Amino acid sequence: MQSNNIGYKRRPYRNIIFALIGIFMLISCEGKEHPPQPTVPEVATITVKPQEVVLSTELPGRTTPFRVAEIRPQVNGIIEKRLFTEGSDVKAGQTLYKIDSAPFQAAINNAKASLNKAKALLPTVNSRAERYKALLVNKAVSRQDYDDAFATLEQARADIEYWKANVETARINLEYCSVTAPISGRIGRSNVTEGAIVTAYQPMALATIQRLDPIYVDVPQSSIELLRLKQRLEEGRLDYDEEKQSNVKLILEDGSAYPLVGDLEFRDITVDPSTGSVILRAIFPNPEGVLLPGMFIHAIIKEGVNNKAMLVPQEGVFRDYQGAPIALVANSESIVEKRMLILDRSLGNKWLVVDGLTPGDRLIVEGMQRIRQGVTVKVVPFEEAIDEHLSPESSSKKIK
């Protein structure tokens, strides 16, 4: 009797379980009969539009002095005095060193004495030649005596010219005892001290003067890039105005911008075989002496103006397994198409596209993870962030 009562008590629970199973099966069957409709993926696009952009190249380089003068003695002697402060500014013509002038003063005195001696003999020799000339008419002297007297006169005149030249040479050597600055600029350290023996035109310079205002900036440019630039200009992809685009800007070693603008002077015509590059030289004002010789800088050099540049956000371009750039666009029917691109360079947070896109294309920049080529998408406009670093005056390509 007890076992029957237990079975009776469990029966209601069993009926409830069977009822729940039936409800779940009914819901499952209804889901199979009415499957959910697939949603159209949503993507954000931008419309490709041509615009005018000034293209420039950022090249590393170094500063070089505008003028350099290595100070060397022009006579042999001993340094008596050094008359400048190392690292100071000197003026052209300023005396830098004094060489012992006693031997050169003696030489000029000796030359002057010999000159006076030659001049003293000239009247006597000249009178004799004149008398012999008069006596020759009456044949009172022989032709040979007259010729000897005339030759002695010419020799006396030549001696005078000779000693004049010696006096001038001695005077020049005496002046060379004062070693002066050939240019104005900043002088470096002295390589000699008082009492040092120096020789004329010796290999070691006594000191070096460098003019730093203005100052040159030399930057190497790849010959390949130079050829590409010429090709762009010839094909009409770039417009170049020498007057407007000869200005050059500098980025200093600490990343700050140099406040003054320089001018591009020339491009060298010789390619360095070791580096495959040519040298571009710009000249910059340097009134405060901020730029020092040998300083490493980056020069921003303008290449030209691209009047039909197509700039697209970098997030709208990806690469395949071979590294080729690819973009996805939504056509007029909102169907995704894949485009193979040719890129020129990066400008801020954008790519400059050479080929693969046409004006009016709707480039997909968001939602690419949920789509593939050939699917239909819902297009919404992309809210593009403003790139403060990209402007017609600062668009550049950095070469390392």
Image (tube, rainbow, N blue to C red):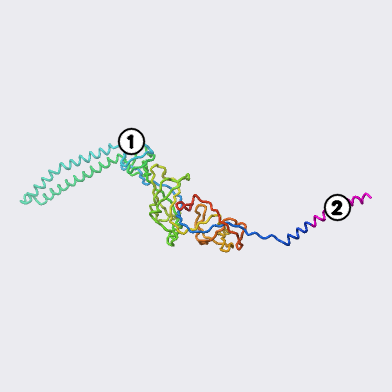
The answer to whether residue 337 is above or below residue 298 is below
- Residue 41, image quadrant: bottom right
- First along the sequence among labels 2 and 1: 2
8 or 311, nearer to the observer = 8
Q: Position of residue 296 (x, y in %)?
A: 45, 46
Q: Identify the element where label 2 is drawn.
A: helix
Residue under the point 42% across and 61% down: 234
The answer to whether residue 335 is above or below residue 244 is below
User: Answer yes or no: do the residues labelled 2 and 1 have beta carbons within 8 Å?
Assistant: no
Q: Would you say 387 lies left or right of 377 here?
A: left
Q: Position of residue 198 (x, y in %)?
A: 34, 40
279 or 127, nearer to the observer = 279
- Residue ID for mark 1: 81
- Residue 324, image quadrant: bottom right
Residue 274 visible at all? no
Residue under the point 22% across and 45% down: 165
Q: Is residue 139 magenta?
A: no
| Amino acid under disc 2 | Pro
385 or 300, nearer to the observer = 385
Q: Residues within 10 Å of mark 1 (few under 14, many from 20)?
A: some
Q: Which residues are magenta?
A: 1-22
Q: Residues within 10 Å of mark 2 (few under 14, many from 20)?
A: few
- Residue ID for mark 2: 12
Residue 362 visible at all? yes
| Amino acid under disc 1 | Lys
Q: Would you say 103 lies left or right of 44 here?
A: left
Q: Position of residue 190 (x, y in %)?
A: 38, 39
Q: Would you say 167 lies left or right of 390 here?
A: left
Give how far apart the Cα atoms at labels 2 and 1 are: 124 Å
Q: Residue furthest right?
A: 1
